[in-house]
Structures are given as structure tokens and as C-alpha cells.
């Protein structure tokens, strides 16, 4: 299973763009990259998923370089409500026995 | 879409009792469900993976007789903490997916278990 490494914490101000990078040097060919957001005492929420290049949805963008050994979650114009823990996961979703292991995550604190 | 409901959200019980936690996929059929445990300020720790109609696969160090998992249908998985003790107090979270190569996990809101 590919292991992920993220910064433990990040601070930002409201209205700024936040980029959180995740390292996954041992990513396998079939692995997808998925990002989740977790608020205290809640289950994680899916943010975005990608395999290569760039993916964008209504809340975030995900940038994946050609070697796929890292990925960057970009949150445009963060607000106070974006204060949460963000997890990068790498796993093979295509086989019946797949599983994903959560890393430590990045604790984002958005200040006014 | 892709809603996972977990019940109860909070439970307090006496040491020695058994507690059952339910995880339901409300609008999709979950071929695979996962159970996690999370301590304060820590990441999620995978306890077991269950596929509908099959026995659960437990992670190393997780006692299968202590944490009974049943994935009896495509929409329901249960985790029973048997003879619970204070050290079993934790935040338990389930997730579900339908297993296609592009489908992420969808998580319940967790169950806060407190054993007195």
C-alpha cells in the first residue's frame, strides 16, 4: 500500500488560496488519489479524486504531476468554515480487496 | 447522493455490556464497507473490511472476537463491540463503497462510544 506524507498543519487567512501537497512516492499504477475533509466529531467528507493531470470540481482542484508521486489539493478563497483536517489517500479501488490507509492528515486553520 | 447513515451517534454504557453500531448505505448498494476507529487528535485507523456475504477481513492487532462485523446485505453492516471495557471507548466510523474503480468511500458521521 502506498504511504502518504502531508504537512501536519497549515495556517491561512480568509479569502486566500490554500495548497496542500501530499507525497506518495510508492503509488501503484492502478492507484487513484482521493482527498477527504474531516470536521471534529464527524466522518470524513469526500472532496475530490483524480488519477493524473488536473481535476476540478465546485469546491477544489487537484493537481497531479506526470510521475504521480505527489498531488496538490487547491482550495480557492478559503473561509473560516474550511478549518478542518484534510486527508490524502492513495488506493486501488478496482479490486475487491482494496483498502486505504489514512495518514496523519493536514490540520488547516483558517483565520479571520 | 451516496449517503451513509450510522446509528447511534452517541452511546454510553457500562463496562461488560455489548454495543451494536449500524452502518447503512441509504441510496446505493455497498459491496464493501469499512470500519475505522479514531482517537482524539489522531487519524482514522482501519479496523476491518467487509464485503457483502463474506467474512470480514480484520487488520493486524484487531481482535475479531471482540469486534464482530456482519455485512448481511448490500445496505447494512454492523459492528458489535462485545464485553466492552473503558479502553474500547473511542469514535467509530464506517464507510461504504460500491467498488467500481472510480468510486471513493462514503463515510457515516461516526459513533462516539463511551464505556463507564
Image: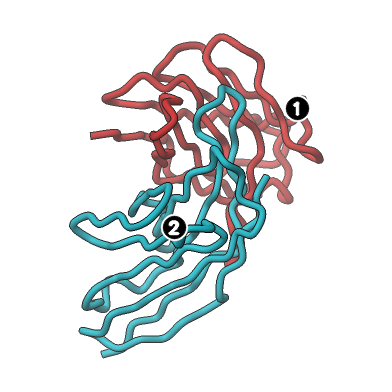
Is B107 located above or below residue A88 in the figure? above
Q: Quadrant of residue B15?
A: top right
Residue A21 coordinates in the image, percent (x, y): 48, 71
Residue at screen point 45% across, 25% down: B99
Residue A47 coordinates in the image, percent (x, y): 33, 54
Q: Which chain is cyan?
A: A
Chain bearing mark 1: B
Label 2: which secondary element: loop
How many angstroms separate mark 2 from mark 1 (CA)? 25 Å
Residue at screen point 64% across, 49% down: B45
Residue at screen point 25% across, 57% down: A56
The residue that mark 1 highlights is B64
Q: Which is more toward the observer, A100 or A93?
A: A93
Label 1: which secondary element: loop
The residue that mark 2 highlights is A41
Q: For label 2, count other residues whose C-alpha is less than 10 Å away and answer few (under 14), some (14-19) or many (20+).
A: some
Q: Is residue A7 left or right of residue B109?
A: right
Q: Is residue A98 left or right of residue B27?
A: right
Residue at screen point 41% across, 55% down: A36
Is A48 located above or below residue B67 in the figure? below
Q: For label 1, count other residues whose C-alpha is less than 10 Å away and answer few (under 14), some (14-19) or many (20+).
A: some
Q: Which chain is red?
A: B
Q: Quadrant of residue A28?
A: top right
Q: Which is more toward the observer, A32 or B81?
A: A32
Amino acid at each position: 500500500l502506498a504511504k502518504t506524507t502531508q504537512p501536519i498543519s497549515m495556517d491561512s487567512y480568509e479569502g486566500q488560496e490554500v495548497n496542500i501537497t501530499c507525497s506518495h512516492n510508492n503509488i501503484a499504477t492502478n492507484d487513484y488519489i482521493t482527498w477527504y475533509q474531516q470536521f471534529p466529531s464527524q466522518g470524513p467528507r469526500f472532496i475530490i479524486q483524480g488519477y493524473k493531470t488536473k481535476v476540478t470540481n465546485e469546491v477544489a482542484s487537484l493537481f497531479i504531476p506526470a510521475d504521480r508521486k505527489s498531488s496538490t489539493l487547491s482550495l480557492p478563497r478559503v473561509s473560516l468554515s474550511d478549518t478542518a483536517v484534510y486527508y490524502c489517500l492513495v488506493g486501488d479501488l478496482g479490486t475487491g480487496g482494496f483498502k486505504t490507509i489514512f495518514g496523519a492528515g493536514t490540520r488547516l486553520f483558517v483565520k479571520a | 447522493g451516496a449517503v451513509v447513515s450510522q446509528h447511534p451517534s452517541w452511546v454510553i454504557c457500562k463496562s461488560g455490556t455489548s454495543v451494536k453500531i449500524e452502518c447503512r448505505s441509504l441510496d446505493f448498494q455497498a459491496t464493501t464497507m469499512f470500519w475505522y476507529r479514531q482517537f482524539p487528535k489522531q487519524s482514522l485507523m482501519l479496523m476491518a473490511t467487509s464485503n457483502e456475504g463474506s467474512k470480514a477481513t480484520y487488520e493486524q492487532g484487531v481482535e475479531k472476537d471482540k469486534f464482530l462485523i456482519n455485512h448481511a446485505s448490500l445496505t447494512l453492516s454492523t459492528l458489535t463491540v462485545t464485553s466492552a471495557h473503558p479502553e474500547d471507548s473511542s469514535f467509530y466510523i464506517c464507510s461504504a463503497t460500491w467498488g467500481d474503480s472510480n468510486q471513493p468511500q462514503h463515510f457515516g458521521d461516526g459513533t462516539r462510544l463511551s464505556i463507564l
